[in-house]
Image (tube, grey):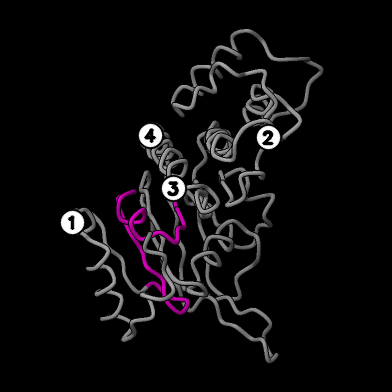
């Protein structure tokens, strides 16, 4: 589903601020695979996600989504393949519009605009059923303005909107980092339910090692612009935070992970 081959990215080349963020990254994700990506600040995890999304163009290498080469496509043209949820709960929704109106916009994304006005009753009932999977009571608040929702409710709604059209690839950019632990757990549980129900190929960036281990079926740790650790299956299920740190120290020859990764 996702193929990243020999990806390189350097920022500010030829200056004193030159920084090589990706160093020949290779990543293959199967259809329906849920991959969590962990790493310290500057490890390259967000750079990788943004390169896949088309926020910036890689200096070298190729990116394919569902067999389509998107390496040279700008961000807006890659959008038809990708659903994305950002770290900021305020992004991804229209605060002055109602919940059902936001869902209608997401459902009609990419469609030709018509003179049809409003949301039909069957559509509204469909949205109500969709909202139930979030388990936040939003199905009874369809006409509420999104700006009145809490950060966690908005982020959960954004997640639902990003997955309504079953994207080829779902990108989650530390989407619970700005939430309190209890709310973050609810959003992560909703993420797991939605990804599992729709069999979505998902790449989730996180700073939280416990979440990286608990969610998804494959874990990648990045260090210095490279993939340092890649575990899946039974090995991942049995993994602990301490074992992951030990693996990191063995691969990198450094105990830096203890300082740069959040272990909460």
Q: Splitting the image into 4 quarters, where does residue 29 fall?
A: bottom left
Q: Position of residue 41 (x, y in %)?
A: 50, 72
Q: Nearer the viewer, residue 178 or 20?
A: 178
Residue occupying the point 67% across, 49% down: 77
The residue under label 4 is 193
Q: Position of residue 83 (x, y in %)?
A: 56, 43
- Name the mark on residue 238: 1
The residue under label 2 is 110
Q: How many neighbours does mark 3 have within 10 angstroms: few (below 14), some (14-19), or many (20 or more)? A: few
Nearer the observer: mark 4 or 2; the answer is 4
The residue under label 3 is 181
Q: How many neighbours does mark 1 have within 10 angstroms: few (below 14), some (14-19), or many (20 or more)? A: few
When the figure is inspected, residue 197 is found, relative to residue 21, above or below; the finding is above
In the image, taking residue 171 as reference, residue 95 lies left or right, namely: right
Magenta region, residue range:
203-227
First of labels 2, 3 by sequence position: 2
Magenta region includes residue 99? no
First of labels 1, 3 by sequence position: 3
Residue occupying the point 18% across, 56% down: 238
Magenta region includes residue 210? yes
């Amino acid at each position: 589903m996702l193929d990243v081959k020999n990806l390189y990215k350097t920022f500010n080349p030829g200056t004193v601020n030159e920084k090589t963020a990706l160093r020949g990254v290779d990543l293959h994700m199967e259809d329906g695979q849920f991959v969590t990506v962990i790493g310290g600040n500057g490890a390259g995890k967000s750079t990788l996600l943004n390169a896949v999304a088309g926020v910036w163009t890689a200096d070298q290498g190729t990116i394919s989504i569902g067999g389509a080469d998107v390496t040279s496509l700008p961000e807006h043209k890659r959008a038809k393949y990708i659903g994305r949820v950002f770290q900021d709960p305020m992004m991804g929704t229209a605060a002055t519009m109602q919940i059902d109106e936001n869902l209608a916009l997401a459902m009609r994304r990419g469609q030709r605009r018509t003179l049809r006005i409003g949301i039909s009753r069957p559509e509204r009932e469909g949205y109500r059923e969709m909202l139930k999977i979030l388990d936040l009571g939003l199905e009874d608040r369809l006409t509420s303005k999104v700006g009145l929702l809490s950060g966690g409710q908005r982020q959960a709604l954004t997640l639902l909107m990003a997955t309504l059209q079953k994207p080829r690839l779902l990108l989650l950019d530390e989407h619970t980092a700005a939430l309190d632990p209890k709310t973050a757990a609810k959003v992560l549980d909703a993420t797991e339910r939605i990804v599992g129900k729709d069999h979505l190929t998902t790449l989730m960036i996180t700073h939280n090692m416990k979440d990286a281990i608990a969610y998804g079926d494959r874990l990648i740790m990045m260090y210095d612009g490279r993939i340092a650790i890649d575990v899946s299956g039974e090995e991942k299920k049995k993994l602990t935070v301490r074992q992951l740190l030990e693996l990191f120290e063995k691969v990198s020859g450094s105990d830096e992970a203890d300082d740069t990764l959040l272990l909460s």
